[in-house]
Amino acid sequence: MTVLEAAMARASARVDRALDRFLIKAAVDPAVIHKAMRYSVFAGGKRLRPFLCLGAAQLCGGRAGAALPTACALEALHTYSLIHDDLPAMDDDDLRRGRPTNHKVFGEGMAILAGDALLTFAFELMARNARVPGVKPAGALAAIETIAREAGTLGMVGGQAADLKAEGWHGHPARANRAWNPLPRKQNKPRERLLDFIHSRKTGALIRASLKAGALLVGAPKDRINALDDYGRWIGLAFQIADDVLDVAGDKALLGKNGSDRDNGKLTFPAVYGLEESRRRARAAADKAKRALAPFGRKAALFEALADFIVNRKK
Amino acid sequence: MTVLEAAMARASARVDRALDRFLIKAAVDPAVIHKAMRYSVFAGGKRLRPFLCLGAAQLCGGRAGAALPTACALEALHTYSLIHDDLPAMDDDDLRRGRPTNHKVFGEGMAILAGDALLTFAFELMARNARVPGVKPAGALAAIETIAREAGTLGMVGGQAADLKAEGWHGHPARANRAWNPLPRKQNKPRERLLDFIHSRKTGALIRASLKAGALLVGAPKDRINALDDYGRWIGLAFQIADDVLDVAGDKALLGKNGSDRDNGKLTFPAVYGLEESRRRARAAADKAKRALAPFGRKAALFEALADFIVNRKK
C-alpha cells in the first residue's frame, strides 16, 4: 500500500464513522427512508470528495477535523446524484458497485425520496459545520454557497440535464430519439465541446467544490482557493476520462457495473477521441493538476500522488 | 379585498419579482432545466410559506426584506416537493393548479432534475441571505439548519415517505398492495396516529420552518420563536384538513386538480373523521393558532386573520 492509499484508507474510515454517527439511525420512523439512505451511502464508495475536502483544509493550514461534517455532506451529495442518475427515467441502471441500485431494492418512489433526503441532509450537515471549534460562520456560509452553486444547474445538475438531453431521451415518449446539443450551432467540434460541457459540470463541479469548501472552512486566502480550484478542474477531467476508459477497457468484475453508459450510446471520451488519445489526455490533465499545486510546495505531495492515482486506477 | 388579502397579494408580488431575479434566466444553458424550474415556480402558487417567513421577520421587529432570499428559498423548496410528489412513481398526477404537471411537459427525468435543482438552489439562496444588511451570519446559519431539518426525513421528506409506504405502493411491483404503517403496532387508533404522523411532517414541518426561519434571520429571542413554532403547528394542521376537505367537497374547477388523492385511496381527514368532524377540527386548530400569537399582542393581527383564512378558503 502506498502512502496515498494509506491516507485515503484512513480518511475513508474516519468519514464512514462520522457518516454513521451523523445519519439518522435506520430504526427511526419512517425506517424505510433511513434504510434506503444508508444502503447507498454505505455501498463502498472511494470517498474521494471527502478526502479532497479534508485534505484541502489541511493543506491550507487547518485541521482536517474542521471540515469533517462538510466532507460527509459532500459524500451525501455524491450519493444522492448516483441514486437519481440510476433511476429508470435517467440512466436506468440495475447495478452500482456490484449491488442492486437503490430503486431496485426500495422501489422507484422511495429511491427518489432517498436522494431528496440525502441532498437535504447534506445542507443540514454543512450548517452544523459552523459549530465545529475553529470554524468561522463566514467560512461555513461561503462553503455552503460554493457547494450549492457547484451542485446546481451551473454545475452538477446542469451537467446531468445536458447529458439527459444529449441522449435524446428523457422519459418523454413524444420526444424520444430527438438528439439535442445545448451549445450554439455552427461552432467547431460540437461533440468535443458538448463532452466538455457535460463532464466539467457533471463530475468536475463537485470535485472543485469539495476542495474549495475545505479551504473556505479554514479561512484560506483567495490565491490558495484559486490554486485548489485549478487542481480540481484538472483532476476532475482526468477522473472522468479515466472512468470512460475503464468503462470500455476495464475489468467489469472489478468495476461492479454492467457498462450501461456504452450500451445507451452515450457521449464518452473514447467515443469522441479514441482509446489511446483519451489515455494521453488523462495523463496530460494529471500533469496540469500537479502543476497547479505549486503554491503549496512539498506539503501537496499527497494531492500530487492522487492526480497520478486517478489516471492509473483499475476501478 | 380584506386587509389580509391585500397584504398577501403584496407579499406574493414582491416574492415573484425576487424569484424572477434570483432564478437563472431560462436562456442560460442547459436552457431546458431552467425552463422546467421556472415552469413550476411560476405556476400560480399562493406563496404562503414566503408570506409566513416575511411576516415572522416583521413580527419579531425586523424588516421583511431581511428574509426575502430565504422566503424565495422556501417557495423553491415547496415547488420541488410538488414536482417530485406528482411523479408517476409517487402520486402520479397529470394536473397541478390547472396546468400539466412538470413531468408531463418536460419528461420524467427532467422533472426529477428540476426538483433536485430547486432544492439545491434553495440552499444557495439561504446562504446568500447572510449578505443582506442587518442579517447576522449566526442567524442565517440557524435558519439554514432549521429549514434543512424540517425539510428532511424528520419533516417533509419523512412525511412523504410515510405517505408513500402507507399507500402500499411505491413503484416496486413485488411490493405493491402491501399496506404499511410506520408506527408501532398495538396502539390505539392507528389510522388517526398515522394521519397525524404524515401530515404534521408533510405539510406542517415546512410551514413551521418558514416562520422560525424568518424569526431566526432577524435574531428573535427563543420565546418568540417557540410561539411562532406553535402557531405554525396549528395552522399547518388547519391547512391540511382544509385541503383534504376541499379535495372532497371543493370545486374542481377552482382547485385546478382532478382529485387523485381520493382516487388513490389515500388516508385523508374526511376519510378518517368524516366531513363535519374534519371541519370542526380545522376550526379548532385555527383557534389554537390564534391563541399561540398572544405574546405578540395586536401586531399579530394579520397572522390571526390568516388562521381564519386558511380554514375558510375556497381553493
Image (cartoon, coloured by chain):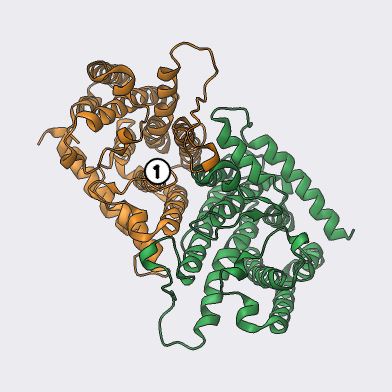
Chain colours: A orange, B green
Say if residue A24 shows up in the picture: no
**Residue for point 67% across, 39% down:** B133
Relative to A51, say whether A290 is above or below: above
Query: Mark 1 is on which residue type?
Result: Asp
Q: Quadrant of residue B232?
A: bottom right
Q: Quadrant of residue A230?
A: top left
Relative to A163, say whether B99 is above or below: below
Q: Secondary structure at mark 1?
A: helix
- The reply, left or right, for residue B66 in relation to residue A172 is right
Residue wearing tag 1: A85
In this view, the residue in front, A139 or B45, is B45
Q: Measured from the top left, where is residue A111 in percent x and y?
A: 41, 55
Q: Measured from the top left, where is residue A68 in percent x and y?
A: 34, 46
- The reply, left or right, for residue B55 in relation to residue B81 is right
Residue extending furthest left? A1
Say if residue A31 shows up in the picture: yes
- The reply, left or right, for residue B34 in relation to residue B176 is right
Q: Residues within 10 Å of mark 1 (few under 14, many from 20)?
A: many
Relative to B252, say whether B238 is above or below: below
- The reply, left or right, for residue A153 in relation to residue A205 is right
**Residue for point 28% across, 17% down:** A281
Relative to B246, say whether A21 is above or below: above
Residue extending furthest top? A188
Quadrant where the image shows the C terminus of chain B: bottom right
**Residue for point 73% across, 74% down:** B286
Instruction: Name the chain under label 1.
Output: A
Q: Measured from the top left, where is residue B177 in percent x and y?
A: 43, 72
Q: Measured from the top left, where is residue A187 in percent x and y?
A: 50, 12
Q: How many marks?
A: 1
Quadrant where the image shows the N terminus of chain B: bottom right
